[in-house]
Amino acid sequence: MSIAPKPETRPACPHFSSGPTAKRPNFSYDQLRGAALGRSHRSKDAKAKLKEAIDLTRSVLEVPDDYLVGIVPASDTGAVEMAMWCMLGERPVDVFAWESFGKDWVTDTLEQLSDVDAAVHTADYGALPDFSKARDDADIIFTWNGTTSGVRVPDADWITDNPDRVVINDATSACFAQEIDWAKCDVVTYSWQKVIGGEAAHGMLILSPAAVARLERYTPPRPLPKIFRLTKKGKLISGIFEGATINTPSLMATEDYIQALRWAEGLGGWRALKARSDESLSILEDWVSRTEWVDFLCADPSVRSNTGVTLKLTDPRFTALDPDAQKAFMKQMTGLLEAESVAFDANGYRDAPPGLRIWCGATVEPSDVAKLTPWLDWAFAETIAARA
């Protein structure tokens, strides 16, 4: 028998997935009626839509005027790997990783780009690596916010200025929710389906003047597939940053991204979106402070993510279980939440320590996070009782 009462109030939206994420509040399909459907993506109208998406991105994120903003294939992964394949090799590179996707860039650097002189610096889930090991003359790859670990960098002060190197920042779950230090970053990437609640498969590639200079002076000693090529005859393909995409984009998804950006702009831009995420995190912090069976995977509040918030179970009845049993426990607990249409996709990432991951990006209403916490208590108690 459960020792926690079943809550009476459910979140209005049960979508707490960390990607794709909840649609913005009051989303409706009617908002997509203006999409340039059935048109060539090279047509004047379609290119105008893509350029509008680029211009709104610059406005909402407050991207510096001398940085370029482009839409590229294959989501954030495609954007990061495009930069890596085109830029790495001119000088050594330091790769910092502390969660699953950052470790993908480690694998790419060590196993795929084997001609690159790389040093790797890692940390376990819930912690950050030692950024003091960053070399002043080396390129850098890092993830601003660890989507699967719930840990973010507090700032970019550890990056020293050097106009001859490039700093690649995978910011897919940070953009629109955390302050990006643009002056310290030469390549910033993200995908539409994270904080802004857009649809998948499209990536954003934002380049500093130093990144453009690297592209135009350095020819990498490796084959580049078409979807990775950013230059032609030694010059940047500028059309990518003006609405001419490398391959065919979804104009329906583009319209949805435009409408999401307009929603963000109406709220007050990225600062307003950040405030929403901060409020949701604060609600969870208050709940954790008075709840005995749970804690944050990230112990340091100064580097705790306000988007993909990761939680670990601390109750001895859970911690005494072996890893496979812990995973089964979490599957059972999150299954109860889904069966009640309270929280979908709240289980931790498959490679992370067993626990919960609650998305608190801006499209999630903070009031729904508050309504979720009693259900977490209920689901935990039900699972404990069922396994007794």
Image (cartoon, rainbow, N blue to C red):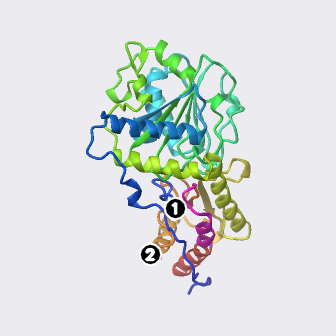
Q: In this orientation, which residue lies closer to the viewer: 151 or 16?
A: 16
Relative to residue 221, is residue 265 depicted above or below? below
Q: Are marks 2 and 1 in contact (CB under 8 Å)?
A: no
Q: Secondary structure at mark 2?
A: helix
Would you name the residue on which mark 2 appears? Answer: 339
Indicate the quadrant containing the C terminus: top left, top right, bottom left or bottom right: bottom right
Relative placement, left or right, of 34 versus 300 is left
Q: In this orientation, which residue lies closer to the viewer: 238 or 329?
A: 238
User: What's the residue at 61%, 60% (across, down)?
Assistant: 311
Indicate the quadrant containing the N terminus: top left, top right, bottom left or bottom right: bottom right
Nearest to N terminus: mark 2 or mark 1: 1
Residue type marked 1: Pro
Q: Is residue 70 visible?
A: yes
* Magenta stretch in the rendered image: 362-373
Q: Is residue 335 magenta?
A: no
Q: Main secondary structure of the magenta part?
A: helix
Relative to residue 370, is residue 137 depicted above or below? above
Q: Secondary structure at mark 1?
A: loop
Residue type marked 2: Ala
Would you name the residue on which mark 1 appears? Answer: 25
